[in-house]
Amino acid sequence: MASLLQGRLPVNQDLLLMQKGTLMRKVRSKSWKKLRYFRLQDDGMTVWHARQAGGRAKPSFSISDVDTVREGHESELLRNLAEEFPLEQGFTIVFHGRRSNLDLVANSVEEAQIWMQGLQLLVDFVTSMDQQERLDQPGWLSDWFQHGDKNQDGRMSFGEVQRLLHLMNVEMDQDHAFQLFQRADASQSGTLEGEEFVEFYKSLTQRPEVQELFEKFSSDGQKLTLLEFVDFLQEEQKEGERASDLALELIDCYEPSDSGKLRHVLSMDGFLSYLYSKDGDIFNPTCLPIYQDMTQPLNQYYISSSHNTYLVGDQLCGQSSVEGYIRALKRGCRCVEVDIWDGPSGEPIVYHGHTLTSRIPFKDVVAAIGQYAFQTSDYPVILSLENHCSWEQQEIIARHLTEILGNQLLSTTLDGQLPTQLPSPEELRRKILVKGKKLKTLEEDLEEEEEEPESELEEAELQLEAQMESEPQELSPRSKDKKKKSKPILCPSLSALVVYLKAVTFYSFTHSREHYRFYETSSFSEAKAKSLIKEAGNEFVLHNTWQLSRVYPSGLRTDSSNYNPQEFWNAGCQMVALNMQTAGLEMDLCDGLFRQNAGSGYVLKPDFLRDAQSSFHPERPISPFKAQTLLIQVISGQQLPKVDKTKEESIVDPLVRVEIFGVRQDTTRQETIYVENNGFNPYWGQTLCFRVLVPELALLRFVVKDYDWKSRNDFIGQYTLPWNCMQQGYRHIHLLSKDGISLHPASIFVHICTREGLEGVES
């Protein structure tokens, strides 16, 4: 196979040495440390491993699966083994999604550097490629070749090609397959190698439905002139007045031939390249960068939020790890939870209290947050502290926050003055805010005290008593005494770090209006929030126009499952916290909403959820919302992955389900028929119709499933996006796995049309 490294990257000594292979130690725990021989394949895109040099090798990982490479000292596991292995010889390969990290220890610092530098070079290279470059990339195609080349002789017989077709989800007549094989066998050797296999693959991936569309607008069937392409962009893609300028840009970008660019024409190959690209994607590229107003108060935004961020497993005996914080922050999460308890040797620890979950030092969590807070987004990070510590360890918490985070930590108002509203994400760029209990009001904090209390303890007791007197007395005297004794008194040095996000108990919307301030925030269990939405939905909406609300999953979700966040977003709740370690529909919705606005973790709420006079009720939405009708023609699929890769003969029977999530009246789903035995290029050509009352709140989720008449259909891939980020016209939807990882090159091809009003449309 042609190598990725040939002509695409300059000759690099690190990569050449990686292709020769290296014996390293694979580490899973203190007791599991095994020698393995790792080698970068000639395609430059995959790493295989064997028990020893020359031994039977098997794939370890693909470069496209790698997120980053970390040095040994950044790994919790390798730090714990520092006495056994020098940290300089270790490194960690971090994968996209929820796949566990791979910790490796080389035999020397030099070998570790070779692999760290080489892998990062390849990761950066793959990341920089656009969608079309990846499609043209022989590297991932080499994976198929190596799977099909059973005897590993670098050639493929027709028998091996037939086996490969099953692996690729292709059910094809044997005579037709043999014709394609002979046509690609230019050397007439009876086998395919190198470019011959690429040609065979191209013949497999011809797109008759795209060819038909191309010929509909092309007068000669060979090319689209500039005017013909403008017609297509206006009529089908709904590009409007900008179509003429856009057509020139797209031809210059996607037409492969220089002569075509000079003549301002688009060939079939260029047309297909455009449709596969980000410009032909269903997600509008104008929504990819920061495109929203980021100068509104914090409470005007949805904020990507995590629950029990420290957990990478379940709530009872799962592992606690700083990796939970790193992964959440790198996916754009802006509100993380830190559950802090007294630890040994005077050092606070983070874990899920009263369970068997493992413990991690609080200072390690703070260090990870400080390092990764702004790698994905510059907008503020909120630390939601659940403080269960003694006075002494609270002081240590405050010291760690101050010393480790330094200037990143917001410890006073932005200008030292009393604000009249919450600051904006723009004003709080690269700042970390603490959300938690506070002894004083913000006003009192900003006043200069002439007389100091006799001690910090006396001050804390006085403030706590004053706070309790100001809140409704719903508990009996005995209950209050018990509560007061069981709760540690809040340490003033920690209290002082809570500026704009003072946590207060919610009693009622009336009580909040009369007693609370805009910088005070309440948390709601999912059950309480659901109840409030049903009983007083409009009041909840109005509450969220001036105060921040955080919703968290029920404590009964011991398996770290999630609720549907949509119903809480419908009420304007800003921080709807999810167990981000758990893949599924709920996280698909979260990823879908926050995919826009540069993945910054902040999305501006619709106007009617920011209006202090709003009449909107999430359970009973009425006009003046601009209802729309959506027509989706599900046309075809491309290279859908096998569900069960262990069964070579099994081929999927795919169907497409389109789901809409929004207000209750808009939440619905429809699906196509299934196509039997074809995951490679299934064709549906089926139109689905949806009528949506409040499109501003709607999310669309496209799910591809493998039909099974005996049991539940198996998941193949999905893609979720906000209604307002959807492009009309002929679009590709590039599928993601359960973990939100690209299933490249798997996609579905659709036509999208929206119309004003709720019209009846025949499918």
Image (cartoon, rainbow, N blue to C red):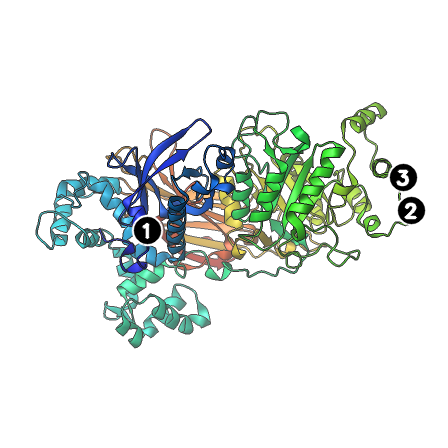
Q: Which mark is residue 409?
A: none
- Give the residue number, with chain letter if any, for mark 2: 451
Q: What separation in Å lies between label 3 and label 2 (alpha carbons)? A: 9 Å
Q: Position of residue 451 (x, y in %)?
A: 91, 46
- Give the residue number, with chain letter if any, for mark 1: 15
Q: Position of residue 90 (x, y in %)?
A: 44, 40
Quick one: label 1 or label 2, which is nearer the N terminus? 1
| Amino acid at dot 1 | Leu
> Which one is in front, 470 or 581?
581
Indicate whether 221 appears above or below 316.
below
Residue 673 visible in image: no
Element type at marker 3?
loop
User: Is disc 3 surrounded by few (<14), some (14 to 19) or many (20+) residues within 10 Å?
Assistant: few
Give the residue displayed 91% in from the left and 50% down from the top: 450
Residue 256 placement: quadrant = bottom left
User: Is disc 1 surrounded by few (<14), some (14 to 19) or many (20+) residues within 10 Å?
Assistant: many
Indicate whether 526 appears above or below 729.
above
- Give the residue number, with chain letter if any, for mark 3: 454
Element type at marker 2?
loop
> Which one is in front, 386 or 665?
386
Q: Is residue 62 left or right of residue 545?
A: left
Q: Nearer the observer, disc 1 or disc 2?
A: 1
User: Is disc 2 surrounded by few (<14), some (14 to 19) or many (20+) residues within 10 Å?
Assistant: few
Residue at the extreme bottom: 263
